[in-house]
Structure formats: C-alpha cells, structure tokens
Image (spheres, rainbow, N blue to C red):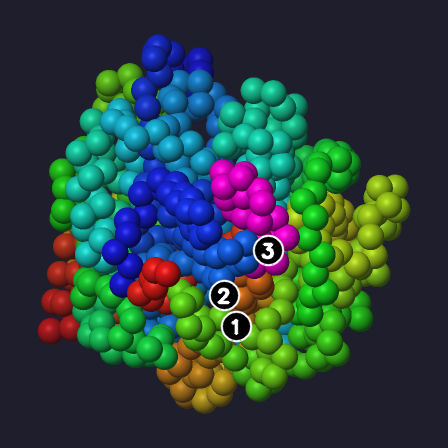
Amino acid sequence: MSNEKPDKKIKVKVGTKSRTIKADYLARVEGEGAMLIKTKDGKVEDVTLKIFEPPRFFEAFLRGRELFEAPDITARICGICPIAYQMSAVHAMENALGTEVPEYLHQLRRLLYCGEWIESHTLHVYMLHAPDFLGYPDAIQMSKDYEEAVKRGLRIKKAGNAIVRSIGGREVHPINVKVGGFYQMPSKEELLKLVEPLQRARDDAQETVRWVNQFQFPDLQKEYDCVSLSSDHEYPMARGWITSTSGLKIKAEEYDNYFEEIQVPHSTALHSKLKDKGSYLAGPIARYNLNRDKLSKIVQETIQSIGFEQTCTNPFRSIIVRSLEILYACDEALRIIGEYDAEKKPASVPIEKRPSTGFAATEAPRGILYHRYRLNDKGIIEDAKITPPTSQNQKMIEEDLFQFVSKNISMPDEELKWKCEQAIRNYDPCISCSTHFLKLTRQDG
Amino acid sequence: MNKLAIVQEPRPKLAVWKFASCDGCQLSLLDCEDELLSVAEIVQIANFPEASKMDDPGPYDISLVEGSITTEHDQERIQEVREKSKVLITIGACATAGGIQALRNFANVEEFKQIVYAKPEYISTLATSTPISKHVKVDFELQGCPINKYQLLEVIKSFTMGKKPAISSGSVCTECKRKGNICVTVAHGVPCLGPVTHAGCGALCPSYQRGCYGCYGPKETANPLPLIRWWEKEFKTEAISIKGLLQNFNCATPAFKEASKNYEQ
C-alpha cells in the first residue's frame, strides 16, 4: 500500500543525474489517480499511472441479483457514462437470453447513446482538455478569456443532456433502460423539442472542430493497434464486431479468448492486453481510424475542410476526433428523431429466463466496454465480469508517457509534468470505473 | 441564481471532495450548464480536482463531500477535510448512506476481494463502507443517487446566504400524487418504494411506468415493512425482488437495513 497521501501537491526532485516527476493527485480526470515518472542519466526509467480509487466490488455484489437489476446497478460504476454501462448490461443480458430486440428500440437506444457521447465528450473537450492547450487551470478561469467558447461548450453539453433526460428521465443514472427495451416510449412531441437545440449544437460542434483544430499539438507519433466495434451499417456504438488494426474480427462471445488482463511489475493497475500482441488503443481515435468511412456527410465535409488526417496517430489530436464525434452524434441524433415513429409501439419485448451466459461490448465515450454475465434458470446473476475502457487504455497511457518523456527529457519539470498530465487526459480516463483497478505498493527508486 | 443570491466579497470558498463513489453527484454541478458560470460568481471554486488544477490549501467556507469511507486512508482524509471546512455538506447516497458499495457490510469483504481481484492480498480496504456522518460532524445531508442538481444549487445558495435550504422532507409518493400519475402499485401491482422514499427526484420512476427503487433513500420516519407485507399479500411479490429493492443504493440506512432484516426474519 502506498504511504504517500494524495494531497495534490506537486513534488519535483531534481538531482544532478536523476529526477522524479510526480503528480500525486491528477486533476481533471474522473476519479482518483496519480502519475510517477522516474528518469536517470537522461533516460526514462519507469512510468507509472497509479490508481488509488477505492475498489467497490461491483462484480462481487452483482452475484445473486436479478438480471433486471444489472442496468441500474452497473450504471453506478460511473456517473459520467452510465448509459454505456446500461447498454453493455442490457445487450449482454439479451445475448444470454436470446432476446431479439426490434430495430426501433435499437434506434432509440442509439439516440440515448448519442446523448451520452455528446455530453461526455463535450465535458472533456471544453472543461477538462481544452484548458491544457490554452494554459488554464480549469474552464471557469478559461472563460474569462474565452467566454464565447465556454458558453458554446455548455450549450452543446446541455443539448446532449437533454436527450438523456428526455429518454432516460435524468442525466445521471437514467431510469428508463430495461432488459428487452425501455419502460416507456418517449412521445414524438417530446423528441421534437430536442431538434432545435440539437441543430444549434450541430453548428456549435462544427465550430468546436475548427476551434480545437487551431490548437498547438505536442509532437508524438504512434502506430497504434486500435480496437473498436465495427459494423457494415453504422459508426459503432452498441452493435458490431470487435475489430482491430491488426486484423482482429470477433464477436463479443470470443472476447475472453483474445483479451486478457495482466498484472505488470511496478504498476498499480490491471492492464488489459491483446493476448500475444500486447497493448492496444480504445476510444475515439480507435473508432475513427477503423470506421471513418461510416461517419455522415456533414462530418466527412468537416474533415475535408480542415484537412484532417485519414488515420490519427498523435494522441494529443484526440481532442479533434472527439469533437468530430460530437458533431456526428448531433447529426445522428437528428436523423433518429426525424425518423422516429414508434411512440405507440411496445416499449419492450418479453424475455424468457434460462440458464445461460451472455456477452456484450459497446462503445462507451472512452472506448470499448465489455460485460459478461452467467445466469441461472431463475434469471439470477451467478457471475459477472466487467472490463471498462480505462482499464484497457492503462497500458497505452503509460507507453505514450514513456515515449513522450523520452523525447522531451530536457523540458523543465513543471512544463513536462503539465504535458504529461495532458497526455493522460488525451484518453479522458474515467478512473471511477474502478471495477478492476489495483492498488500496489509503490516502489521508490 | 445570480438574481437571488447576494454576491459577497470575498466570495465564500467552495471545495469539492471525492471518496468512494461514481463521480455522478459532483458531475451534477458541471451539469448545471445554465448556472455554472453564475455559481462561479457567488462562490470561489477553491478546490475541485475533477474540474480544476486549482489547489487552494483552505480553509474553505463550504465543502461538498461525495462518496463513502472504505479505506483507512480515507478515514484520515475526511478528518482533514472537516478541520479545513466551516460547513461540510454531504452529497449523494454514498456520502450520506454508504452507497451500493455498503453491500459489503452484509457480506465477507475478503470473499468480495477474491471474486474481483486475481491478487486480493494487494487490496487494502475496510470491511465496511460507511457514511461521512459516521466519522465527522456533517452540517447538511443531500440525499439521492444521484442528487438533484437544482437541490444542490439551492443548498449552495442557501449556505452562502446563511439560511436553511428549502428541501422537501416528504416522500416520492406525494410528489407522484402531485404530478397526477396513476399509481403503479394500485393499478398494476408493481412494487414501488415511493411511500417510504425521500422526495427529490420528482417521482421519476412511476412517471416512466416503473416502481420507485428507493435511490433517494428513506424519508424521515419511514417504515417499509408494512408496505412490503402488503405487496406480498396483494401482489405475491417475490422475496428476491423485495430484497433487491431494500438492498441497493441506500442499503445501509437504518430504515432500509432494519426493514430488510425484519423481513428476512
């Protein structure tokens, strides 16, 4: 167990040959984490992203619960992306029970997911990440010089939250998602109220892409093995194969055959990796690199207008990809609302309990989120496994830091520390999703 | 908000702290899209790691505390937070009741560790998840999983003005009646904790054709047992469903804990 206190003080030790850069409490990430970088003789010796988020044991107390409870309980893993947890949970349960959900319910779920992508991505772009690029401690300070930009961010975020509230009942831990569908269908009239704010948000999102595209990006180039869902029909959210740059194409049922969680010496967290291959990247860059041709016309045009690369290889540029996904989610939400004609249709389909195991992966804003449940004949959960996206990106974050510090070893400590924090925030790490994070003894060099 | 609040100079210092939680309640503050910049006009956000690198050492006029106490380290940290805070307000079910992670209080935490972690010996955690009030004096508790962001604004505004927050102490059931909903229990036999659950959500679940699952925790003087006996008698509600309702986000509150214990006897 680490003895140091997460007191958020910056400790920088500078010796003649070795130095240690620590951020004891990472700011502007969701949850509690810390970073430790050790260098010696101008070379990086060790990089550790520490997670000291207290474990809450979701996978343990899910045992013995009714399958209906999984969406409400797993939502509480993360207040920032509860929809992702609800979506992975209901899809895994439906997979277990062989439940076929009609297309209009899939579309409504997609609309709900769009709402979460919009609010979560906008929170990150404007309030957590942009201040790094512009040199402010937070968005409120930033708003003194960039008031219009911050107000634009708040408007987009509000439009995303309005979708979640309209379909789900409330922004955090919505209550309308159910195994088999929803508890209640929204009326067309209710959804039409979202159109005007979403049209404005779509314009604002285009402006966001242009805004973040002008930022100065630290240089870091990586050949990532990207992992995301991919589908022939749509930009991935809740359906599709699990695919990778290196040629993987599997169903969620096969996830455990290809991915494993390992414990790394001197590390503080379980790291997810592709068996035999190693670390991989999940999240907006991975989705974009593997599925950019599925983005809608307005997004394609915006990509062209800013001359954005076909394959993103600089993690600092994730803020542009995230902004493109905000634009896409606004556009996609407007499409779904325009086509919606299901208010009189059944809100859910019946399910039949049976002993079974179900698997699902969906695209949380931060990347792929895997759930697996084993159920008995009464619909009681016997076993649960949840692999959140931040757990999957842990290893890649450390590798990015290692490479970045190696390249910028002469940078002054304070600046290097800030840039490293910024590099961690490239991943929008959501440490509260701490179903799987370990806390280990810190080994001081 | 800025119309009602008197701007004091210097502005009162606000700090936001996180313990074991999902971050959803502190996110509610950032979800106040229309009010966020005006909140920043009436209080100085002095410490809010999720949103800012600002690191004001305190003391603070108001501390908002999210999350429950589950580690030895956090046991000490909450004492430090209390010492540095004139007013300490807990936000959400974790901080006021221990949260869903308090299910460990009724189980063996060593077994929990083994289920989740390959190397359980590295996990240092307390056997219980406890509310903040178990450790330090709390000046105000805002219930809910998650909290209602408008209630949070009311609480912040009230404490900066030195008045008592206007938060209803009624039940979800009364909110539901005021909305004119058809009762899901009476009409459809759906078990609903509305009559014993603290108001604040706006009777959300019954408005969506499902029963209340008690995420705002028990209302004052709640007595769930007779309600449960009535569900059993009238609607043949199964034991597992009843336990599920009592043993979730507010499982460690005295009212739900007692009801659960007495029900099982």
Q: Amino acid at mark 2?
A: Ser
Q: Amino acid at mark 3?
A: Ser
Mark seen at residue A391: 2
Image quadrant holding the C terminus of chain B, namely: bottom left
Pick whichever of labels 1 and 3 is earlier in the sequence.
1
> Do the dots labelled 1 and 3 sit on one chain?
yes
Write down the residue under mark 3. Answer: A406
* Circle nearer the viewer, 1 or 3: 3
Q: Position of residue A105 (x, y in %)?
A: 64, 63
Q: Amino acid at mark 1?
A: Ser
Q: Position of residue B231 (x, y in %)?
A: 26, 65
Question: Would you say residue A323 sits in the magenta stretch?
Answer: no
Write down the residue under mark 1. Answer: A272
Other residues around mark 1 within 10 Å, as few (<14) / some (14–19) / many (≥20): many
Is the C-beta separation of discs 1 and 2 under 8 Å?
A: yes
Image quadrant assignment for residue A203 = top right
Q: Which chain is mark 3 on? A: A
Image quadrant holding the N terminus of chain B, namely: top left
Task: Say whether residue A86 is visible.
Answer: no
Pick whichever of labels 2 and 3 is earlier in the sequence.
2
Q: Nearer the viewer, residue B199 or B75?
A: B75
Which residue: 17% across, 42% down? B79
Which residue: 79% across, 59% down? A311
Q: What range is drawn magenta here?
A: A400-423
